[in-house]
Image (tube, helix red, strand yellow):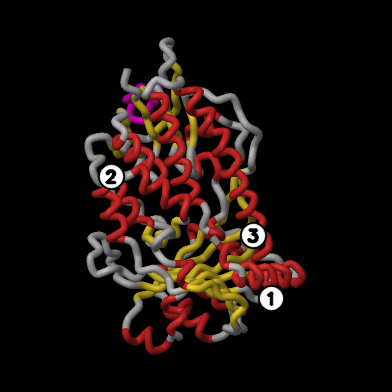
Amino acid sequence: MRLHVIIIGCGIGGLCLAQGLRKAGLSVALYEKGPRRADPHWLQGYQIHINPSGSRALEGCLSPAVWDTLTANACVPHTGLQVLTEQMKEIAFVESAIMDGTSHVLIGRATLREVLLEGLDDVVNFGKEFIHYERTPNGRVTAVFADGTTASGDVLVGADGTGSNVRQQYLPHAEIVDTGIVGAAGRLPINRDRQGHLPEHLLTRLTSVLPPNGTYMIVTQSIYRSEAKYIDPMGDHLIWVLVSLRAPYGDADPKAMDGESIRRLALRATDNWHPMLRNPIADSDPERISAVPVLTSIPIAPWESTNITLLGDAVHTMTPLQGLGGSSALRDAGLLRHELVEAHSGTCTPTVAIRRYESAMINYGFAAVRRSARFGRIVVSDSRLLRTALKAALRIATSIPSLTT
């Protein structure tokens, strides 16, 4: 019997899984509460840095044609990774040979979503808000949607993000908590005038800025290839992200704040920084500036596997400060796809396949959660000892290339 898999959520993990299942000949249907076009959320215009494990999962799940489209629409890779002080003094640098696009993929989130939707028009259902699931007497699972419709399958996968309704029903004890950290971000076009007022390395390298205490900044770029099919309306642009504790935001909800208010807070937080690092903040259009609270999951003990499972942020939401979330979701998709193909071939039951997937995913997924949370605490800490130790560790790690891969 042909295995039918229901996926709730059309984020990159769910779409990657769907591509992989279709490629292997399994029956799949995706259900997304939102519209066809990506919601204009603050992250949609930003990048995802896909590490080698995520890249391998993507390539394994995609058809050659879709993989070629993805690589053609990836951004031009950085020329290296640099860590600077707030006065633009170098702490560490990773050579471009390690940061090139052969094992790492740099791509816009919205672009990646568009690429992953290619060829799935007949299996993706938009405007379908998942409410709950029900188990049927024959062992299948039925998803119930807000519009009163239902869908049944042999396996149900919750790929519906941090606010996952599937997780809330299936693992109600799994918590998502506010870290007390806020990430503010903005974008500005890279034009000739900008190129003349910013140093070349801020326009070509992935940059981390580590001041003595309290804040952390990331500067990156979206530079599109000439053959790209999906290009942001802004064209090539610079991206800055400033991370800090919530205190300066007071009782306000960062997501509800206007861009000008966020920009003023960001400039105040960087008051004594080098002007070259403050200029991107000052020059950004307030309409392109937003902020969100940084959330994280709380790792939980393994649970009894069934024909329902979760992937990506639906199970292991992590802070974005080390760029592990997207790659972890893709790794989940690649592994789950492999195990479900085994079940489809008859070598094991869906529950056994999911148990094998969850056994691995819980280990590496929650390890990434802990690592990301620990890094977040360090970069907003006022402890000079912790930050000095981090700077020393960065210098050591970047002097030994194998430690950074």
Check disc 1 and report the residue beneath it: 212
Closer mark to the observer between disc 2 and disc 3: 2
Q: Which stretch did the figure color magenta?
A: 141-152
Q: Residue at x 34, y 56 (%)?
A: 110
Q: Are marks 1 and 2 in contact (CB under 8 Å)?
A: no
Q: Residue at x 39, y 40 (%)?
A: 14
Q: Nearer the viewer, mark 1 or mark 3?
A: 3
Residues under labels 2 and 3: Cα distance?
36 Å
- For residue 145: magenta? yes
Q: Quadrant of the C terminus?
A: bottom right
Is residue 299 shown in magenta?
no
Tell me the residue at 50%/48% (across/down). Answer: 328
- Is residue 350 depicted above or below 232 in this figure? above
Residue type indicated by callout 1: Pro
> Dot 3, how many residues are within 10 Å of its Cα: few (below 14), some (14-19), or many (20+)?
some
Can residue 261 be seen here? The reply is: no
Residue 212 at x, y = what percent? Answer: 69, 76
Residue drawn at x 46%, y 75% is 205
Of residues 182 and 357, the one nearer the viewer is 357
Q: Quadrant of the N terminus?
A: top left
Secondary structure of the residue carrying tag 1 is loop
Looking at the rendered structure, the secondary structure element under dot 3 is helix
Rendering coords of residue 204 (x, y %) = 42, 76
> Which mark is drawn over residue 375?
3
Compute the Cα span from label 1 to label 2. 47 Å
Q: Position of residue 63 (x, y in %)?
A: 28, 44
